[in-house]
Structure formats: structure tokens, C-alpha cells
Amino acid sequence: MIDFSKIKVEKPDKLRFGTAGIPIVAHEAGAKTPEGVQAVRNLGLECMELEFVHNVNLNEQSAAIVNDVRQKNDVTLTAHGSYYINLNAVEKEKIGASRGRILDAAKMTRLAGGWSVTFHAAFYLKDEQSAVFSKVQGQLKKITDELNDSGNKIWIRPETTGKATQFGDMKELIALSQANEQVLPCIDFAHLHARTGGKNNTTEEFHELLSMVENGLGKRGLDNMHIHMSGINYTAKGERNHLFLEESDFKWRELLKVWKEFKIKGVVVCESPNIEQDALLMKKYYEGLK
């Protein structure tokens, strides 16, 4: 059995900016995950999200190598779990498979020295929101119980989603986090903008979102933020695709000012098509704020 207690994972000491996956410049040169972590540091960034969206592409040996490179370069790692997850599936076997995919990602992410793993938790289908919430909450309890039994203390992060048909608004995720000490939201601010057809895009609304975290989760929430950022294209039905920050109507500068005001800590993972360029753009702007 793996002794997760021997894997030292540092909590982010500030707000760290980085990329969703291996930086483009390194990926184009054929870099694998260890070289990607090194490239993040070379670019002046401080976090990277492992992309386990199609499969968990590390094993115990390669994860140990990634952890070594991560520690030497002071890079915080997170992971995005499988796209093939629905904790509200009709078929029990699909729910079990979804739970297994989250556990597999959580195991390998922690072995790589990862701090947090996120995923899209569920679809409403034709069910009442309250019923879906109860179902997701029950499955997350099973997941975190199993992680605790193995000593794996990684954060489990259902993500705010970009369409109203998907489970994952702020109120739902804060309530899940209140019910489980090992669960916190992954807040994708672009998704919240798209999900509401263009709302969540003013200083006042950004204040309201961060106040929800502070009031619902306190210091635990504000000091352990896992954030996704990008520009976004959307319709009345929600998200269509990610855009460069500067090609979107998303008022990201106003949002970063609110982050500074709330003194949040954690990671900001850039999912724009130009991942490292927009990550560096945000980092430079944020660090220049007074």
C-alpha cells in the first residue's frame, strides 16, 4: 500500500499563476510532463495543471519523477480529471466508473506532489436540482472516505460549469464544501460568466462571488483557491469555447483587483488557447496592483 504521508505537498503561500497542461512552447518541442514543469518555472510561472481529461497518463514511477522536478522548481501542481464523469448517471455502473476515475486521478496527482484535483461532477439530466445535489454529495462522501482510508489528503474540487444543464453553480459547490472537509470548489470565473448569459462580469458581482466564498467557507476557502481563467465565447445557453482574454468581453482586470482586495491564496490555472501568454499577462497585472 502507498504511504501518502511521505509525500510532502506544500500549500500555496500566495496566488500562483500557471498553465492548463504543458506550456505550448514546451509541448511543441515534444516535452513530457517533467519537462513541462521545468518550462513553467523557466517562463516565470508557478503552477501547472496535469491534464487527465482523457486518461491518467502517469504511473507510480513517472509520478515520482514529476514530484522531484516539481519540488526542485517550486511549482504547485493540480490536475483536471476525466471528462467522462457523471455522478448523477442513471446507470449505477457509470456512477461507479465516474467515482473510480476521480480516485485514479487523485491517487496519481498526489503521487506527483499535486495539491488539488478538479472535475465536472454531474449533469442534471431531468432530475430536480436538490435530488442531484444529494446524489453528488453522497458520492463525494464515498470518494473522500476512501481517500482518507488511504491517507490521501488531496483537495477534491467539483468545478463551476459553463452551462445551466450541468451541475455546478456556486451555491451548490459551497454547500458541498460545507458538508465535507476535503472538498472545496474549483471556481472557473469564465464559466460563471457564460453560465449566466453574460452576468458575473462587474466589480460588484465579483465582490458577491468572493463574499460567498468568505461567508460560506471562511479562511479555508479564501486561502485555498483553485481558479480557472480564460476568455469565453457563449450564447444564451452557456459556454461555447474558450478565447484569449483580450478577445473576450470578460472583465478580467476588474476581477483580479477583487482578488487582490480579498487577499486570496492558491492557484490560477489559465485555460485560454494561448495558455502561457495569458497566464503571464494575468501574473504581471496582478503583481502590479497595489
Image (cartoon, rainbow, N blue to C red):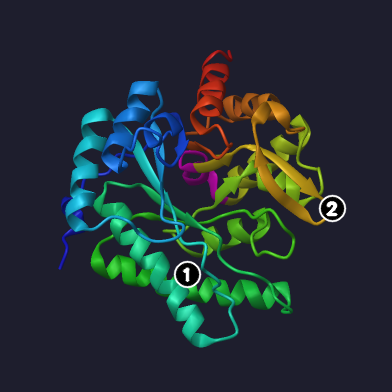
Where residue 21 appears, x then y in whole percent? 43, 42
| Residue 214 in view here | yes
Task: Tell me the kind of residue under disc 2.
Answer: Ala
**Residue displayed at 50% across by 23% down:** 280
What residue is shown at x 23% (from left), y 50% (from top)? 63
Disc 2/disc 1 C-alpha distance (Å): 30 Å
Q: Which residue is at 41% across, 68% downward?
A: 101
Give the label on residue 140, or none.
1
Q: Which residues are magenta?
A: 217-225
- Residue placed under numbered mark 2 in the picture: 236
Above or below, 59 relative to 250: below
Kindly identify the amino acid type of the residue bearing the numbered disc 1: Leu
Q: Does residue 266 show up? A: no
The local crowd at label 1, few if under 14, some if 14 to 19, many if 20 or more residues have their Cα within 10 Å, is many
Q: Which quadrant is the C terminus positioned in?
A: top right
Q: Is residue 56 above or below residue 85?
A: above
Q: Secondary structure at mark 2?
A: loop
Residue 112 in the image, given as x and y percentages of width and height: 26, 48
